[in-house]
């Protein structure tokens, strides 16, 4: 999990990186202002480590739908 520093904000981003060399990288695109939700997602992403990119993309789609409402940018759009 990465901590992204912004002025007056602590943002947390669970990230999946994998692939050969620099190709095939996939980053989970949700950035949280709430650390609790970021940790929950991180825990759900952990079992995907070591899986193929196709398996991860398939598994991540439902997780993305489940957590996208907690993205700090979604709150800014409202």
Image: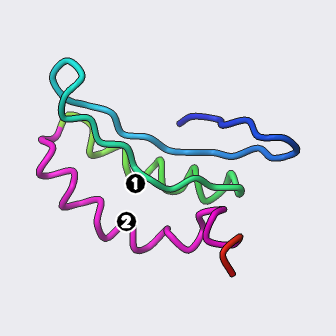
Residue in the image at 50% along x and 69% along y = 68
> Which residue in the protein does label 2 denote?
63
Colour treatment of the image: rainbow
Q: What is the secondary structure assignment of the residue under circle 2?
A: helix
Establish if 78 lies above or below 47: below
Would you say 13 lies left or right of 60 here?
Answer: right
Q: Is residue 56 magenta?
A: yes
- From mark 2 to mark 1, how far is it between C-alphas? 8 Å
Q: Relative to 40, say whether 76 is above or below.
A: below
Main SS, magenta residues: helix
Task: Say which quarter of the image contains residue 5.
Answer: top right
Q: Are marks 2 and 1 in contact (CB under 8 Å)?
A: yes
Q: What x and y, as percent, mark residue 9?
A: 81, 47
Magenta segment range? 51-75
What residue is pinned by disc 1? 44
Residue 75: image location, x then y, percent: 68, 72
């Amino acid at each position: 999990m990465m901590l992204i520093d912004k002025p007056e904000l602590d943002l947390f981003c669970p990230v999946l990186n994998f692939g050969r060399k620099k190709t095939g990288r996939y980053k989970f695109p949700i950035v949280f202002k709430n650390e609790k939700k970021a940790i929950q997602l991180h825990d759900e992403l952990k079992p995907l480590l070591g899986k193929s990119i196709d398996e991860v993309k398939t598994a991540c789609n439902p997780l993305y739908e489940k957590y996208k409402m907690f993205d700090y940018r979604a709150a800014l759009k409202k």
